[in-house]
Image (tube, helix red, strand yellow):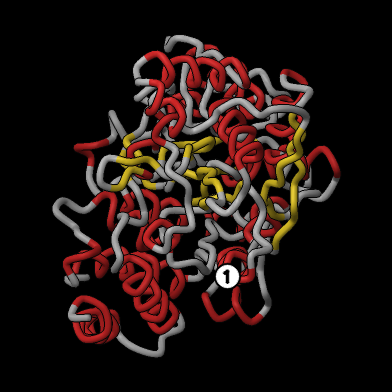
């Protein structure tokens, strides 16, 4: 188990003392102030606040320990978060603390001098904090991770029982997954159920994220996208067989992954770990149907990695707007020191969020939450995996991912063959991004 980390203003005070103790008086005058001079309110960007409790949970828990600092959440649209944040930063109306929703746009924010250097905060945190190194550029840290999502395979135990099929056992490859999805669809139809074997959401991530993480030597920034082909061929085959809703059906009818799995329209679904908290909340509220479910490791490229399954997922971190004043910066740094601690991880685990800080205590808190499946495979899926980033930090990442998103739509809609679409994407990446 990892050591517990001192939180809140305790860390802020420790930072101040450390900075003062290792510098001259002149250096101390120029060192960053890390303790606010009095009561202060800082704003924090978030999205879907009514259904995404992590922001208020962190704000409330921190304020309880640090009553002189209030963290006030400011709501953004989840779908257009980065577009809106970029506009607010340009207009000077951005919040004091804002979320790095994934790594796709981190380089753009950092390179544009829109993130404060947080190396002094990072130096106080456990260096094994998942995702911390992803926010480091040329030796300086610009965001602190509080969440580390990984993609699992969610499955409906009741539908498996109705179909007379065995649950996933943690050894599945993508071929095994496809076979079971096809067999499940047929078995459920024979039993009079309209549910399909699986559901793949319309994002590029469920195909491209796994392909990049699991394929040896795959490199998003190389401009060679041939590693994506077998993953697309597998998913198209499932779509063609009727084991999952087609991309056209999903986009035309604006299907949501929450409704597809939560109302038992699909027996399986690859999805990120954040959905655990959502599904628990929706089953409690009645927005999802009540059924037994579990999580299994994501299917693997081959059997060589089943003991330590390879999956993907970017960290979610918090950065500080460098335009804020010193008192707000000190308060914001104290809050970020807290979000990287075990205390914050415990608060998040208790609402079903997978925190960046991992320990035995955090794992027990997570599985102590009512509604979280506690079987051995679910525990294994949560605690044992090699999570690789979906978005390597680079000036090229955003441009390449946008091109690959176009390719994804073309392929899944049947507008082009896999081979032709990937060849076009490679040509575009070379001419529009990598040579610029």
Q: Is residue 186 left or right of residue 91?
A: left
Residue positioned 41% across, 28% down in the render = 129
Residue positioned 52% across, 46% down in the render = 319
Q: Is residue 309 left or right of residue 106?
A: left
Residue 194, by quadrant, is: bottom right
* Percent of width and height locating residue 226: 19, 70
Residue 6 or residue 309, whichever sits in front: 6
Residue 112 or residue 256, whichever sits in front: 112
Reply above or below: 242 against 435.
above
Residue 390 or residue 47, whichever sits in front: 47
* Percent of width and height locating residue 15: 48, 21
Residue positioned 26% across, 78% down in the render = 433
Residue positioned 77% across, 25% down in the render = 68
Residue 374, by quadrant, is: top right
- Asked whether the viewer can see residue 192, the reply is no
The residue at which mark 1 appears reads as 90
Residue 102 or residue 272, whichever sits in front: 102
* Percent of width and height locating residue 177: 39, 51
- Quarter of the image for the C terminus: give it: bottom left
Reply above or below: 405 against 98.
below
């Amino acid at each position: 188990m990892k050591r517990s980390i001192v939180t809140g203003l305790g860390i802020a005070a420790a930072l101040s003392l450390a900075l003062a103790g290792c510098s001259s008086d002149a250096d101390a005058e120029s060192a960053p102030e890390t303790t606010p001079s009095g009561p202060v309110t800082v704003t924090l960007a978030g999205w879907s606040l009514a259904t995404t409790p992590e922001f208020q949970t962190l704000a409330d828990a921190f304020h309880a320990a640090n009553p002189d600092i209030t963290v006030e959440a400011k709501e953004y649209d989840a779908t257009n978060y980065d577009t809106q944040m970029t506009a607010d930063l340009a207009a000077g109306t951005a919040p004091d603390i804002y979320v790095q929703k994934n790594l796709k746009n981190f380089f753009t924010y950092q390179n544009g001098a829109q993130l404060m250097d947080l190396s002094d905060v990072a130096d106080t945190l456990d260096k094994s904090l998942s995702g911390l190194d992803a926010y480091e550029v040329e030796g300086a840290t610009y965001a602190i991770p509080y969440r580390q999502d990984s993609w699992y395979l969610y499955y409906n135990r009741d539908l498996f029982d109705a179909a007379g099929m065995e649950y996933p056992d943690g050894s599945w490859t993508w071929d095994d997954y496809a076979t079971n999805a096809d067999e499940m669809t047929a078995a459920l139809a024979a039993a009079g159920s309209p549910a399909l074997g699986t559901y793949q959401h319309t994002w590029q991530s469920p195909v491209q994220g796994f392909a990049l993480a699991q394929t040896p030597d795959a490199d998003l920034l190389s401009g060679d996208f041939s590693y994506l082909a077998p993953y697309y061929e597998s998913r198209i085959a499932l779509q063609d067989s009727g084991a999952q809703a087609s991309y056209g059906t999903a986009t035309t009818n604006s299907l949501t992954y929450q409704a597809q799995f939560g109302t038992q329209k699909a027996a399986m679904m690859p999805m990120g770990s954040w959905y655990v908290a959502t599904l628990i909340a929706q089953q409690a509220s009645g927005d999802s149907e009540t059924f037994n479910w579990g999580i299994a490791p994501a299917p693997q490229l081959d059997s060589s990695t089943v003991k330590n399954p390879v999956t993907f997922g970017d960290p979610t971190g918090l950065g500080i707007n460098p335009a804020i004043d010193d008192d707000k910066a000190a308060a914001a740094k104290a809050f970020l020191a807290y979000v990287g601690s075990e205390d914050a991880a415990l608060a998040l685990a208790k609402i079903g969020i997978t925190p960046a800080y991992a320990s035995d205590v955090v794992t027990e808190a997570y599985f102590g939450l009512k509604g979280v499946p506690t079987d051995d495979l679910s525990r294994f899926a949560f605690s044992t995996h090699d999570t690789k980033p979906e978005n390597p930090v680079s000036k090229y990442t955003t441009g390449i991912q946008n091109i690959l998103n176009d390719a994804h739509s073309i392929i899944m809609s049947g507008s082009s063959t896999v081979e032709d679409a990937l060849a076009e994407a490679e040509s575009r990446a070379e001419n529009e991004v990598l040579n610029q």
